[in-house]
Each structure stands twice: as structure tokens, then as C-alpha cells.
Image (cartoon, rainbow, N blue to C red):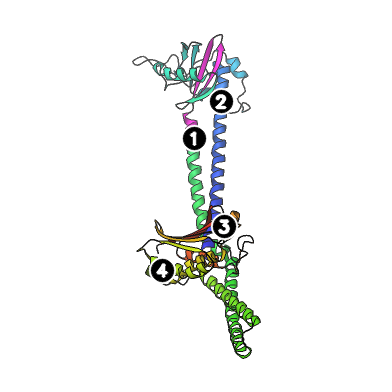
Amino acid sequence: MIKKLRKKFIRIAMLSVVLVMALLTGILNAGNYISVNSDLKTTLVMISENPDLFQRRGGRPLDAPKDGEFMPEDPWDVPFDDREKREDWDFSGERGPFNKETPYSVRFFTLSYDENGALLKTNLDNIVSVEAGDTESFLTAAQKKGEGFGFLNGYKYYVYRSGEGEYTAVFLSAFNEMRSCRKVLLVSVLASCACILLVYALVVLLSRKAIDPVVRSAEKQKQFITDASHELKTPLTVINTSLSVLEMEVGEQKWIDKAKGQTEKMSELVNSLVTLSRMDEEEPPMKLSDMDISNAVRETVESFRETAEQKGYMLEADIEEGLVYRGDEYMVRQLVSILAENAVKYTAPGGTIRFSLSKDKKGIKITETNPCEGLNTEELGDLFDRFYRSDKARTSGNGFGVGLSIAKAIAEAHKGDIWAESPGKDVIEFTAVLKQL
């Protein structure tokens, strides 16, 4: 139990950390992308509204020589036609991503076309990676998009109406911005993974200390149950012996029979508590051996046939022959006995109890099905809780509500599980899967 509790604590802690780091990484990268995208949009709008401000800046100069021609002394020193207009613009940062270097650093080109999609003019002065023959795909994307913003092959573009029956598409190079976003994504993911691994190491190291109070409480509880059980065994034995002696002296009496019956029930409860306490240990005491589980299950089921028939129940067993399983034979027989005893107690009058044993891909599967009056399907998951009894489905029983808890502990000791479900109205089915050890 302690090992399971520790694993559950680690899983919950790490799941919380992973979710928080994933959320943080997502928010960081989403915020970064939104910010970059907003800056690109603002730049595109600025270019569309003030094309002269960005004319022939930082791109290919109009008078740059072709191959073999004379190179001017300073080909990038291209005069600006309207210096007063340039000086009127304030690039101090009030206009988002802009500063005094912006007109010289942005890389863009424009395509103008009419309503029929015919290209009217191009401006490739501020770009070197796009030639006149490369504009067809960009023009097609702009026409398909219509007015508004889009993204194509590393370019953020903006389509707007520039005149009567004329549209202009501004394509802004966003390679550096996208590369920066990818770097931020990569770094944030790596940093998150590193943090998760570090937290995992710390959680594993400190998990024992974190659950130490629970461990101490559980150990004290188990010790109390064990000590109390041993202390109760002696007086119960004395009471039972005294009742037997008294019966020999005074003869059979109903009061003596009732007292002996309650003493036997108390002894049964004490033994069940001791069994549960032993099953709660880190490594439950098990005697593993290869056994003929088909024969073991059949013998155990058949031992309840007479009791079932006396109560008017039919008992059917569908046992797959020749199955060999490595486990604790005593525990497996005890699990089947618990299911059979539970079925005999709570099966509806005239019902049929069905047992089956088959090979499962993980090991072996044991199934018990019986009709049960007043079955509440919402309580099926609680049936394996200790001392749990359903008022509607189990009022006819006289048990303590620990049998199915022991069955679950046995299944888990064999690395398997047991559960209850309702395949039909007022029908309950228990399924136990035991894995190969």
C-alpha cells in the first residue's frame, strides 16, 4: 500500500508540474507569436499608408549596376525625395515596432493588380530574394485571400484597395521573425523539459518524506489490528470452549447456540482483519508455485454446489481445461471462495450462479455472474471498500463487508485487478484478472 501511495503521489505531483509547465510554455510562445504577428501587421499597414517613407531603403538600389557594369562609389546612398516628410515622422517607439532604422531594415515588395487579377505593376526595390518571375504564386495567393492579412512561404502580406478597381498586396519578409519564434519555442520546450526532469528527481527523493506521516499512521493502524486480533483470539477461544462445556452440562439451548454463532462470527472477523493486515504489507507473504488453476477453481466452485442447491440456486461452471498459472494457490482458492460465498448470500431466489475461467492475454480471467435483486449500479465501485455494505443489495447477508476487500487485495498481490459491473438489469458480474508472475 505504501509503495502504491508513493507512486500515486509522484504521478499526481508530476502531472501537476507537467500541466503547469505546458501551460506556461504555451502562454509564452503564444504571447511571443501574437506580439510578432502584431508588429508585422503594423509594419505592413505603415508601408501601405506611407510607401514613400520606405522607398528604396535597405534594399536593392535603383541605380545598382548590372553584371559587368561600373559600381558607384556608394550605391546605397540613394537620396530621399521628400526629406521634410521623413523628418516629420517620429520613430521614438510610439508607433509600436518602429524606430529610426526601421525604413532601412524592412524587406518587402508590392504587387498591384486589377479586379480581374491582371498584374499592373510590381515594386521589387526593397527585396533581393524575389525576382520578377517569382511573383506569380504570390499574386495568386493575394487574389485568393482578398482584402486582409495572410501568410505565405515566410512572408506576411497585406492586401488593400489602392484605387478604383485596383488592389495592392504588400509582402513583408518575416523569415527572421519566424526564426526567432522557433528559437523561443525550442528554448522554452527544452527549458520546460529540464525543469520537469529536475522536479521529478526532487519529487522522487522527497516523496518518502512527504508521505511519511501517512506511512506512520498506516503502520500504527496495521500494528493495532494485528495486536488486537491476537488479543481477541484468546478470549474468543475461551468463550467458545466455555460454551461447549456449558452445553454438555445443561444440554442444548438456543441461547447457547446464539452465543456460539456470534463467537464464530467474531473469530471469522478477527481472521479476516489479520488477512487484510498481512495483505497490506509492502510484499504480501506469498508461496508461488506452478499450479493447475483449472483444477483449483473447479474444486473450489464445486465445494459450494450443495449449499447453492439447498438454497434453490443453480450453479454452472465453464472452466477452460489445462490452464497452468504461477501464483499462490491458497490465495487463488480463497479469492474464488469469496466470490462463491458472496454469490450464495446475495443471489436472487431461483437464480443461476455462473463461474468461468479462461486464458487472458495478461494471464488468466475468473468471472462470476449472478442475478441480484435491487442492484444499485452506482455502488458497484464501492463494493470492494472495507466494511462497505449496500442497504438495498446486501441486506440479506450476514457478513462484515471485508470479503471483497480481501479478494481485491489477492488480485492486486498477483499484479492484477478485480471489478464489478452490471451486464443486464439486476445482474451483477465480478471479473478478476490475475497476471502471470
In this rendering, position of residue 211 left or right of residue 139: right
Say which mark, if any, is on residue 41.
Answer: 2
| Whether residue 332 can be seen here | no
Chain-order first, disc 2 or disc 4: 2
The correct choice, above or below, for 117 with respect to 378 in the image is above
Helix, strand or loop for disc 2? helix
Around disc 1, counting alpha carbons within 10 Å, would you say few (fewer than 14), some (14 to 19), or many (20 or more)?
A: some
Say which mark, if any, is on residue 381.
Answer: 3
Image quarter in which the C terminus is found: bottom left
- The magenta-colored residue range is 157-182
Place residue 428 in its image quadrant. Answer: bottom right
Chain-order first, disc 3 or disc 4: 4
Around disc 3, counting alpha carbons within 10 Å, would you say few (fewer than 14), some (14 to 19), or many (20 or more)?
A: few
Place residue 301 in its image quadrant. Answer: bottom left
Chain-order first, disc 2 or disc 1: 2
Q: Which residue is mark 1?
A: 180
- What type is the residue that disc 4 sits on? Ala
Residue 197: x, y in percent? 49, 53
Let me know if residue 167 is in the magenta part. Answer: yes
* Cα distance between the residues tagged 3 and 4: 28 Å
* Cα distance between the residues tagged 4 and 1: 68 Å
Single out the mark in the foreground, 2 or 1.
Answer: 2
Place residue 127 in its image quadrant. Answer: top left
Single out the mark in the foreground, 2 or 3.
Answer: 3
- What type is the residue that disc 2 sits on? Lys
- What type is the residue that disc 3 sits on? Gly
Q: Which residue is mark 4?
A: 296
